[in-house]
Image (spheres, grey):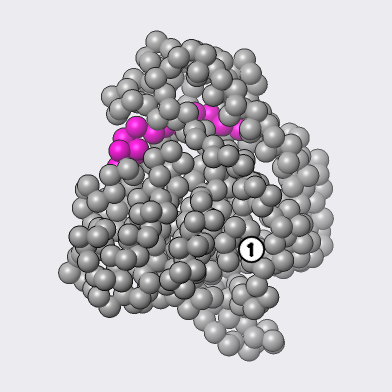
């Protein structure tokens, strides 16, 4: 039985250590903010190459906390791609700010820096002829202030932060890296999470570094921001537990999850190597068989965390045939993401229309993901690619 993500095989590798660590927490009684939390934060800072890591309850909370710390809210425009998991844009709406969608690069599936420039200009000048902007009755683009960009490292590949940070600097915008799918990825000598002023990640079980429930973290080199994150995480707490100096949330990571993550970090580097081995084996097998599939783009100097191995079929009909033929062979697949966010009901209030983001829309119709985890062997990878031969 081929699994899309094999968490059981992984669990067998870390079982002894995870169970011992969790049991220590249970017996020790420090379920909230026990010593494992600070220990994990120090390890993650070393790993990601940042000064501060502040763990939190989920990747979504990390994004919300980042925006809260910067006082981003009603009247503020935050630029983000529509081809991502809903949480990215949801966090913007949660704090009352307005998501402004920006199309993606057709090769990397990450935010397109040229389109970003146009979108900022379109909001600034309030001119939809430059780039599509929200145009529903309730949104007044002329009253929006451009504040931030949340770039997403989709499927594990980091976005083009050299260009994104430069564009942001010109306009005095904050950049947040949504590294929920890319923790462990590299861009040159840097790690995902460290590529913008604030990095956010998720430890949801299916992410490259997952825990056994929900979890997340924020990364920054800024001392003041880190202190703000720590305060917001516990109800805006001041220097004393019962002094409340700002509005915050219940955003802590459970001690049990921190303990489990500390154990899992020990095999994480090996897992990243194995994910890469799997991706390269897929690439080679697909090329060898001459399948009509576009394999993932990997820009020079970048190493993906391979949260997903996603390919593009020639069109929707071809995708359907390929996925059906895999299903017949007992091989699970998935579509990330079948509908870009500007066409989702939850974001209808922005007034975007079909055709606004042509690349995201076209890719949503062609993309699908094959099984991806560190424990796929070469024979299985070949059998997966073979199962697509008849339909290609
Ligand atoms: C998973 C994910 C999130 C949210 O993380 P949770 O821990 O599930 O809240 C945010 N952004 C992206 C791109 C994700 O894939």
In the rendered image, the vertical position of residue 244 relative to residue 84, given as above or below: below
Residue in the picture at 65% in, 28% down: 277
In the rendered image, the vertical position of residue 353 relative to residue 242, given as above or below: above
Q: Which residue is mark 1?
A: 219
| Horizontal side, residue 68 vs residue 41: left or right | left
Secondary structure of the residue carrying tag 1 is strand
Q: Is residue 28 magenta?
A: no
Image quarter hosting the N terminus:
top right
Q: Position of residue 91 (x, y in %)?
A: 44, 63
**Furthest residue in direction top, as rendered:** 390
Q: Is residue 367 magenta?
A: yes
User: Would residue 245 be visible to someone looking at this image?
Assistant: yes
Q: Nearer the viewer, residue 233 or 108?
A: 108
Image quarter hosting the C terminus:
top left
Q: Position of residue 229 (x, y in %)?
A: 61, 73
| Horizontal side, residue 34 vs residue 311: left or right | right
**Furthest residue in direction left, as rendered:** 137
Residue in the picture at 74% in, 47% down: 265
Q: Position of residue 138 (x, y in %)?
A: 21, 71
Q: Nearer the viewer, residue 289 or 209?
A: 289
Residue in the picture at 51% in, 76% down: 70
Highlighted range, magenta? 361-373
Residue in the picture at 48% in, 78% down: 71
């Amino acid at each position: 039985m081929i699994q899309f993500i094999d968490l059981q095989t992984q669990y067998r590798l870390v079982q002894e250590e995870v169970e011992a660590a969790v049991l220590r927490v249970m017996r020790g009684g420090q379920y909230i903010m026990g010593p494992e939390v600070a220990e994990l934060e120090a390890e993650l800072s070393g790993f990601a190459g940042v000064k501060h890591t502040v763990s939190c309850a989920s990747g979504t909370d990390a994004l919300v906390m980042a925006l809260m710390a910067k006082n981003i809210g009603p009247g503020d425009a935050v630029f983000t791609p529509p081809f991502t998991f809903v949480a990215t844009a949801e966090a913007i709406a949660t704090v009352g700010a307005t998501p402004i969608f920006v199309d993606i690069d057709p090769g990397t599936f990450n935010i397109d820096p040229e389109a970003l420039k146009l979108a900022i200009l379109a909001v600034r000048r309030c001119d939809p002829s430059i780039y599509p902007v929200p145009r529903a009755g309730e949104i007044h683009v002329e009253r929006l202030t451009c504040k931030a960009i949340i770039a997403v490292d989709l499927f594990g590949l980091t976005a083009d932060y050299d260009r994104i940070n430069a564009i942001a600097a010109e306009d005095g915008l904050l950049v947040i890296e949504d590294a929920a799918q890319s923790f462990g990825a590299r861009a040159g000598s840097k790690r995902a999470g460290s590529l913008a002023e604030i990095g956010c990640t998720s430890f949801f079980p299916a992410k490259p570094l997952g825990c056994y429930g929900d979890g997340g973290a924020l990364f920054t080199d800024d001392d003041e921001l880190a202190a703000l994150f720590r305060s917001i995480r516990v109800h805006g707490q001041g220097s004393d537990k019962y002094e409340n100096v700002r509005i915050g949330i219940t955003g802590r990571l459970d001690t049990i999850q921190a303990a489990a993550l500390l154990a899992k970090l020990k095999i994480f580097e090996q897992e990243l190597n194995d994910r890469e081995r799997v991706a390269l084996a897929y690439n080679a097998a697909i090329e060898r068989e001459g399948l009509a599939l576009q394999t993932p783009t990997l820009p020079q100097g970048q190493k993906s965390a391979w949260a997903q191995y996603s390919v593009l079929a020639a069109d929707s009909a071809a995708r359907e045939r390929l996925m059906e033929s895999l299903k017949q062979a007992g091989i699970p697949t998935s579509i990330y993401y079948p509908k870009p966010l500007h066409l989702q009901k939850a974001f209808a209030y922005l007034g975007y229309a079909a055709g606004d983001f042509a690349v995201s829309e076209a890719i949503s119709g062609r993309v699908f993901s094959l099984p991806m985890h560190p424990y796929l062997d070469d024979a299985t990878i070949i059998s997966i690619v073979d199962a697509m031969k008849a339909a290609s």
